[in-house]
Amino acid sequence: MKNENKIQYIYGIADNALILGQRLSELCGHGPSLETDIATTNMALDLLGQTRSYYQYVAQLSGEEKTEDDIAFLRTERQYKNVLLVEQPNVHFGYVITRQFLYDVFHLLLLQELQNSNDEMLSAIAKKAIKEVSYHQRFSSDWIKRLGDGTDESREKVQEAVNDLWKFTDELFHMTDDDKIAVESGIGVDVTTLKDKYHQIVKEILEEATLMVPEVKWFQKGGKQGVHSEHMGYLLADLQYMQRTYPNMKW
C-alpha cells in the first residue's frame, strides 16, 4: 500500500476526531451543569489527543518536514475527509448529545476492529483510544436516555435532533477508494460490515429512551470526498485563525 493511500485513509479517521473535538471544545464553559461541562471538555481533549497520534504518524509517513500542527491547521476545507455528521453545529444540548451518540457508537465499533490492523501504529492508537471512546459512548447513551425519557420538552428536543441528524449517519459506512485499498492491505476496516451492528445498538438505546428511529430514505454525503456543509468553513476559520494569523508561532 502506497504511503499516500495510507495517509488519506488515516485522514478519514483522524479528521473526524479533530472536527468533533473542535465542536465539543466550543462548549467549554457553556455546559448545562459543571459536571457535564467538564465531561464534554475532557471528551474534546480525548479526541484531540487521538488526533495528535494520527497526525504525528501522517507527518512521519509524508517524508516531508511537516508537523501535526501543519496538518491540523494548514489544510484547506476540501482536504479534510471527516464525515458531515461531526461538523454539524451545537444547536442545543440535545443536538450535542445526539451528534455525539450517533458518532460514538460507530467510533467504538471502528476502533474494536482497527486494533486488529496489520499496521502496528494504527493498532496501537486504536488500543489506547478504545478506552476513552468506551466512556464517550456510555456518557452519550446515558444522556440520550435521560433526555428521551425525561420531560416532554427534553424528549421533543432530542427527538428533533435525532430526526435532523439521522440523514448524516449512512455516510459513516461509505467506502472511499483509499478505504478499499486499506482493507485489501489488511490495514483498514471494512466499515460496511459494521452497519447492522451499529443500527442494532442505536435502535435499542433509542427505544429505551422512548425515541423513534427516523424513517429516512435519503441521506447526505460528501465529507469523505472533501465536500462539506456550509458549517465547515466557519469551523475552520475559528480552528485555524491563530496559526494563519501568526505563522509558526511558538509559545
Image (tube, rainbow, N blue to C red):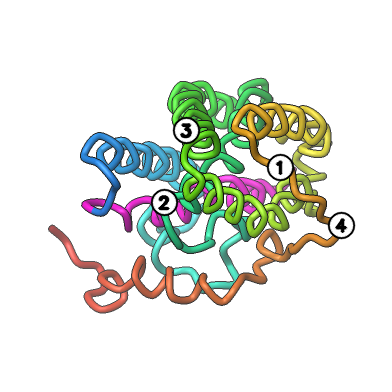
Q: Which of 135 and 79 is in front in this view?
A: 135
Task: Give the image location of residue 72, x and y in percent.
Answer: 42, 59
Marking on residue 146: 3
Q: Residue at x 82, y 31 (%)?
A: 196
| For residue 42, above or below residue 218 | above
The reply, left or right, for residue 83 in relation to residue 197 is left
Mark 3 or mark 2, which has the lower sequence index?
2
Amino acid type at mark 4: Lys
The reply, left or right, for residue 231 in relation to residue 190 is left
Mark 3 or mark 1, which has the lower sequence index?
3
Q: What element carries label 2?
A: helix
Residue under label 2, please give it: 93
Q: Nearer the viewer, residue 101 or 158?
A: 158
Q: How crowded is mark 2: few (under 14 residues within 10 Å), some or many (20 or more)?
A: some
Marking on residue 212: 1
Q: How far apart are labels 1 and 2 at the CA level?
A: 19 Å
* Magenta range: 1-29
Q: Can residue 61 be seen in this view?
A: no
Question: Residue 8 in magenta?
Answer: yes
Amino acid type at mark 3: Arg
Task: Give the image location of residue 15, x and y in percent.
Answer: 53, 53
As drawn, the residue found furthest toward the left would be 251
Mark 1 or mark 2, which has the lower sequence index?
2
